[in-house]
Amino acid sequence: MKNNITLTLATLLAFNLAACSPTPTKEDKTHMTSEIINDVMTGNVLLDSWKGPFGGVPPWDKVDVATLAATLDKGIAMSKADIERIANNSEAASFENTIVNLEKSGSALDRASTIFGVHAGNLNIGDIGDIQAEMSPKFAALGDSYTQNAALFARVKTVYENMDGLSDEQKRLVDDYYKGFVRGGANLNTADKATMSTLNSRLATLTTKFGQNVLHDEQGYVTFISDKTDLEGLPDWLLSSMANAATTREKEGQWAITNTRSSMDPFLTYSKNRPLREIVWNNYYNRGDNGGEFDNNAIISEILQIRAKRAKLLGYETHAHWKLENQMARTPENAIALMEKIWPHAVNRAKEEVADMQAVADAEKANLSIKPWDYRYYAEKVRLAKYDLDFNEVKPYLQMEKLREGMFWAAGELYGFQFNQITNVPVYHEDVRVWEVSSPKGDHIGLWYFDPYARIGKRSGAWMNAYRTQEKLDPKNPTTIIVSNNSNFVKGAEGEVVLISWSDAETMFHEFGHALHGLNSDVIYPSLSGTSVSRDYVEFPSQLNEHWLTTPEILNTYAVHYKTGAPIPQALLDKISKAGNFNQGFATTEYLASALIDMKLHMAGGEPIDADKFERETLTALGMPEQIVMRHRTPHFNHIFSGGYHAGYYSYLWADTLTSDAAESFKEAGSFYDKTVAKSLRDNIMSVGNTIDSAEAFRAFKGRDVTVDALMRDRGFAPQKD
C-alpha cells in the first residue's frame, strides 16, 4: 500500500513521474490535480500502463530479466522526481493536491516492482537473486527519501491538522499517512535521519540475504532414495509425487523428498524407515543452520540489533513496541497475554498426545522414546487407533481441481462471484492459469491467477499476491483488482490427477480467503484497499474461509473419489468430524513456540545474541516438550527475518480468535451459507478494507467485541457449547 513505509520490495512506497503544469487559478485546481498525476509513457513495457483486456494485465511475456535492474533503477528515479514535484507544489497543501496526488502516484514503479516481486518469489533462478541483492538497499533508500522529505511531511502534516470537512474514509487515509511518516522517522533531526538511512539500507541487505540462504537450503538438501526397501509404508500417491520430483531433478528411477513442508510432512507421517525420517527431519528443520556461507545465525543477530537501534532512535522501548503500535493488539504485552493464556493448555495437550504415542510404540515393542521425527508417524497410528481414521482413505477424495471448483462455488453462494477461466492473457509459467471474476449480472470484478505447484526457484509455503489493487479515484473509470494464489503442492506426472492432503486443502481455502478479501474490496483509495489492514487482522478473513471446506455442501459435492466420482462417505466424514481436535496440542504448541520466540527476540534489546542458544534456552524456560520443535525454527524463520511478520507472528492466533468468534455467528444461524450473516460479513469485513478501525469493523459484524471463548472451544481447550 502506498502510504505504509516498509523496507521490503513488495510493500515499499513508490511514485510515478507526472507532467508538470503551471500554478493554477482557484477555478483550475481540480483540473490541475488530474493532470499532475497522469502517467508518462516511457516506452518500457514494464513501467508503462499495462495493455490488454480487463483494464490491462501484467505483461509476463515481455519480461527481459537482463534489463530488470535498469528498469527498476529508472522507476526509482521517476519516483524520486515525483516526490519532489508533490513536495514542492507552490499551492497550499490540501487533501486533493497532496494526499490524492500521493495516492495516484507510484504507478510506474508499482508495475515494474510487481513484476519483479513475482519473479523473486516464483521464478528465483539465474540472475534474479543478484538483482534482489542489488535493489533491496536502493528501495530502502527510496523509502527514506520519502519519509525524510521535510517539505512533503510538512504538507501531509498541514492536511492532518486541518481535516474538518473530510469524509470518514478521507480522515482515515490522512491519519494513516501522517502516522506512517512519524513512524518512519519524519520527526528526527538531520543526524538521526542519516543514522536511520544507514540502518535501513543494511537491514534491507540482510533480510534479502536471509531469504536467499533459506531458499538455497531448500533446494540444496533434497533426499534421494534409490533402494525400494526404503519406501516401506509410503502410500502410492506419495510414491508417485516423489518419483516425479526425482525425474524433474534428472534422477530418473529414484524417489525424492524435497526440502519443503509439502514433501517433508507426508514422508514423516508414513515412512517406516526411522533413520531416514531423522535425515529428512534434520534437513528441513536445519535450513539456514548448517554453517558456512548460507548460515543465518550471524544475520539474525545483526538484524535484531538494527531493529532495536531503530526503535530506540524513534523513541520506542523495543522493536516490538514500535511494530504493534498500529496493530489491533496495540502492545506486545497484550499479544503475549493472549499467547500465555493458550500456551499451558496446548503444552498439556501435547504431553497427553506424546503419552498416547509412546504407548503405541511400547505396544509394538519399538524400543524407542518418541523424538521429533517420530511425532507425525506415531500420531497417525494414534489417530487410526482412537478414531479409526486413516487419512490415506481421505486422500483419494481430495482432488485439487475439484476442491478449487468447490472454492469457486462457495464464493458464489456467499458473495455472488462467478469464475470463468480465460486464456487470452499472458502468464509467467506454464503452470499458471487465470480466471475472470464477475458479478451475477456479468460485471467484471477482477482476475484470479493460480500458481499451485512447487518448482525449483519458487519459495516454499503458500501466499496471496495483489498485482493490482481495487480503487475508485476516478469513479467513471474504477480500477479492478488482480490477485493470485501461490502454493507448493507436489505436481504429479503428466495426466495424473493431483491429490492433496487435508492440510493442503485447508491451505488452499485459507489463501483463497485472502484473495476473496481483495476481490470484495469496494473503497475509493488504493492505500486502504482490500488486504491493506493491520497484520493481526489480515489473517482473519483467510482463516475464516477455511471453515467452508468442512461444510457438507462442499464435501458432498466436491470431495469425490478421483476414480469413481463417488462422494466421500458419510462414515468417513463422521470420523473426520469426531477427530477434529486431534493433535491440537502439537499444532498449537509448534505455532505458539514460534510466535513467542518471535516476540521475545524483538523485546530482548539490542545486544548480540547466539540465535540457537536463545531459541534453546527460551524454549526450555517455557517448558517446550522435547518431542516438538518450533513450526519455524529461528534460522529459517522467513516470516520474521525476510518478511513482514517480525514481532507479528502472534497475528495468526489473534486472527484465529476473531475467526472462531465470527464462525459461531454462522453456526448460530444454522448454516455457513446463511444469506443474512454472509451479507454482514461482506458489508462490514470483506469490502471495507482499512477504511475503518479493525476492532470497529468486527464489532459491526458481531455486535460486540471479540472474546477468546470460541477459540478455546474450537481447540478443545474449554467446554463446548450445548
Image: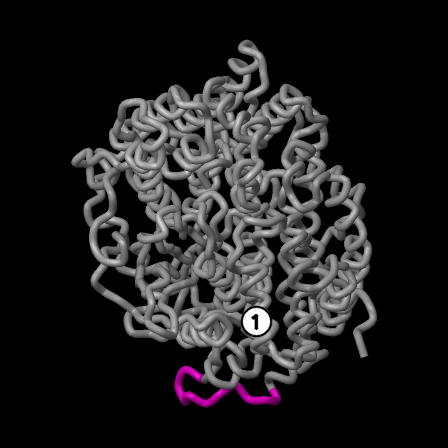
Taking the image as shown, residue 631 lies to the left or right of residue 241, namely right
Taking the image as shown, residue 636 lies to the left or right of residue 380, namely left
Please indicate, yes or no, whether residue 84 appears anywhere in the rendered image. yes
Q: Quadrant of residue 565?
A: bottom left
Q: Residue at x 39, y 61 (%)?
A: 452
Q: Quadrant of residue 65?
A: top left
Is 418 magenta? The answer is: no
Is 567 magenta? The answer is: yes
Q: Quadrant of residue 440?
A: bottom left
Q: Residue at x 66, y 65 (%)?
A: 662
| Residue furthest top in the image | 191
Q: Residues within 10 Å of mark 1 (few under 14, many from 20)?
A: some
Q: Residue at x 42, y 70 (%)?
A: 417
Q: Residue at x 70, y 34 (%)?
A: 614
User: Which residue in the protein does label 1 denote?
Assistant: 678
Residue range in magenta is 561-571
| SS class, disc 1 | helix
